[in-house]
Amino acid sequence: MRILLCGCQGRMGHAVEAAAKGDAVIAAGVDAVSGERAFPVYAKPADCREAVDVIIDFSHPNALADELAYAVENSLPAVICTTGLSAEQIATLQDAAKHIPVFFSGNMSLGIGLLCALTKKAAAVLGEDFDIEILEMHHNQKLDAPSGTALMLANAAKEGVDYEPEYVYARHDRRQKRDKKEIGISAIRGGNIIGEHQVIFAGADEVINLTHRAQSRSLFATGALRAAKFLIGKDAGLYNMEDLMDF
C-alpha cells in the first residue's frame, strides 16, 4: 500500500510514518514545511510524481481543497483525518465522495468509535432524565475547539435521544437554569495532553461517566492506516468509523 501522506512534517505525520510497516509504505509526502525525510516531500499534491494507492491527510483545513482535487483527478481514495473543517469544507468533502471513496472521522481511534456507540445507546436508554455534558482535553498547540471528537460524541448522543438538543459551548453569558434539552460541550487546552474525552450523564441520584484517554499518537496513526487499507477497492462514497468497526 503506497501512501501519499499530507501533513507529513507534523506530529501525526511522523506517527504515521513510524506505524507504517509490512504492507504499507510512505511513497511521498506533502507539507508547507520543507525538510528532508526518507521520502520526497512536496509543497502541494499536484507536484507529486510517485505512484500512490491512497492519500492519508493529517494536515490543515486550508490544504483540503487541493488534496481532494488531486484525489478526484487521479481516482485515489482519501482518508481525511484533519479536524476543524468548516461547513463549506464538509460540503466539498461530500461532493468529492460522489467520485472517489472518502473516509472522514473526527478521531481515528477504534476506542472512540466504540465510545460513540456507547454514548448513543446510553442517551437512548437514559432519555431526558439525565443531563448530557461532554468534556474534552487536549495539548496547548491544538487549534480547533471543541475537538472534532467532541462533536462526534455530541452527534452520537443526539442520535440516541428523541428530542432535538441544543449544543451549548459556554455558560458564562447564561443567567438561567440548565435546559433539559441542552448538551454541554467544554474544552480544556494545556500542556501536552494527547487527548481525553468524557461523556457525562448526570441524573438526580447518580452519574454515569464514559471516558476515553489517548496514551499515544500511535493509536491514531494505526487507525488511519487501517482506514486506508479498508478504503482501497471501495466504491465512491463517504465512509466513517462505524464502517471501519465492521472491517
Image (cartoon, rainbow, N blue to C red):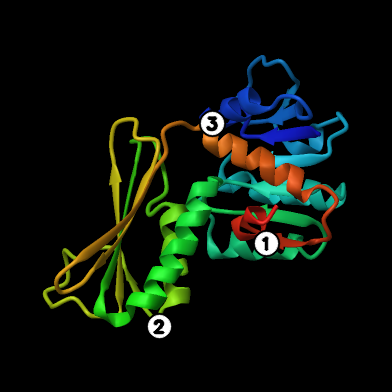
Q: How many marks?
A: 3
Q: Residue at x 13, y 78 (%)?
A: 177
* Residue topped by disc 1: 92
Q: In the image shown, does 121 or 189 lie closer to the viewer?
A: 121
Toward the left, the furthest residue is: 175
Q: Are marks 1 and 2 in contact (CB under 8 Å)?
A: no
Q: Residue at x 33, y 80 (%)?
A: 127
Q: Earlier in the sequence, mark 1 or mark 2?
A: 1
Q: Residue at x 69, y 33 (%)?
A: 5
Amino acid type of the residue tagged 2 in the rendering? Glu
Q: Indicate left or right for 159 with 139 as reference.
A: right
Q: Earlier in the sequence, mark 3 or mark 2?
A: 2
Q: What whole-number distance in Å separates the C-alpha atoms at marks 1 and 2?
A: 26 Å
Q: Nearer the viewer, mark 3 or mark 2?
A: 3
* Residue topped by disc 3: 218
Q: Earlier in the sequence, mark 1 or mark 3?
A: 1
Q: Nearer the viewer, mark 1 or mark 3?
A: 3
Mark 2, other Cα within 10 Å: few <14 / some 14–19 / many ≥20: few
Q: Residue at x 74, y 41 (%)?
A: 55
Q: What whole-number distance in Å separates the C-alpha atoms at marks 1 and 3?
A: 28 Å
Mark 1, other Cα within 10 Å: few <14 / some 14–19 / many ≥20: some
Q: Quadrant of the N terminus?
A: top right
Q: Indicate left or right for 192 with 160 as reference.
A: left
Query: Can you give x and y, in whole percent of width and height, for residue 178 in the image?
Result: 18, 76
Query: Can you give x and y, in whole percent of width and height, for residue 71 in the image?
Result: 79, 48
Q: In the image shown, does 57 or 234 lie closer to the viewer?
A: 234
Q: In the image shown, does 163 or 63 lie closer to the viewer?
A: 163
Check residue 164 in the rendering and tell me which mark sits there, or answer none.
Answer: 2
Q: Nearer the viewer, mark 1 or mark 2?
A: 2
